[in-house]
Amino acid sequence: METRKQGSVLFGLILALVVTLVVVQLWLVAASLDALHRHDRAALIPAAAASLVVLLINVVLLRYVVAFDRRVREARRDE
């Protein structure tokens, strides 16, 4: 499989994962706001921690995509 095809497949899969993670993060925000409205502070910290973990995963995925794109561009330039 050529690198351009691999990059397209990789980008598509990562995009699908990011979309799923964003939906999960929106659900966590909704759960946090509901807990805050009910004055249930015990649920706020776990939801915030989980949201932070999701954010970190998204940052790592973004860095990976950018690094992969940089490698592909450098390989094309060297050809």
Image (cartoon, rainbow, N blue to C red):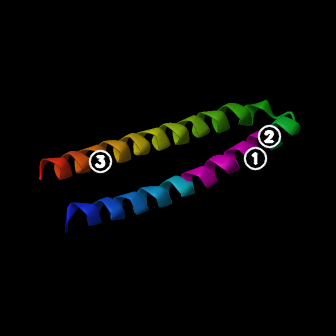
What is the x, y in percent for residue 74?
A: 20, 45
| Mark sitting on residue 30 | 1
Residue 6 image position (x, y, % from top left): 27, 62
On the picture, is 78 further left or further right than 45?
Answer: left
Magenta residues (range): 21-32
Question: Do labels 3 and 1 touch, CB within 8 Å?
Answer: no
Q: Secondary structure at mark 2?
A: helix
The residue indicated by pointer 3 is: 68
Q: Which residue is mark 2?
A: 33
Q: Amino acid at mark 3?
A: Phe
Q: Position of residue 55 (x, y in %)?
A: 54, 39
User: For the residues carrying marks 3 and 1, which lies nearer the camera in this image?
Assistant: 3
Comparing labels 3 and 2, the label whose residue is closer to the camera: 3
Q: On screen, 40 above or below 70?
A: above
Residue 49 falls in image quadrant? top right
Outermost residue, right side: 38
Q: Residue at x 13, y 47 (%)?
A: 78
Which quadrant would the N terminus be assigned to in this image?
bottom left
Secondary structure of the residue carrying tag 3 is helix
Q: CA distance from mark 2 to mark 1?
A: 5 Å
Please check the rendered image and state whether residue 27 is part of the magenta-colored stretch, yes or no.
Answer: yes
Whole-percent x, y for residue 26 in the image: 68, 49
Q: What's under tag 1, amino acid-wise?
A: Ala
Q: Taking 66 as reference, is 39 above or below it?
A: above
Secondary structure beneath disc 1?
helix
Specify whether residue 33 is painted magenta: no
Q: Looking at the image, which is closer to me, 27 or 66?
A: 66
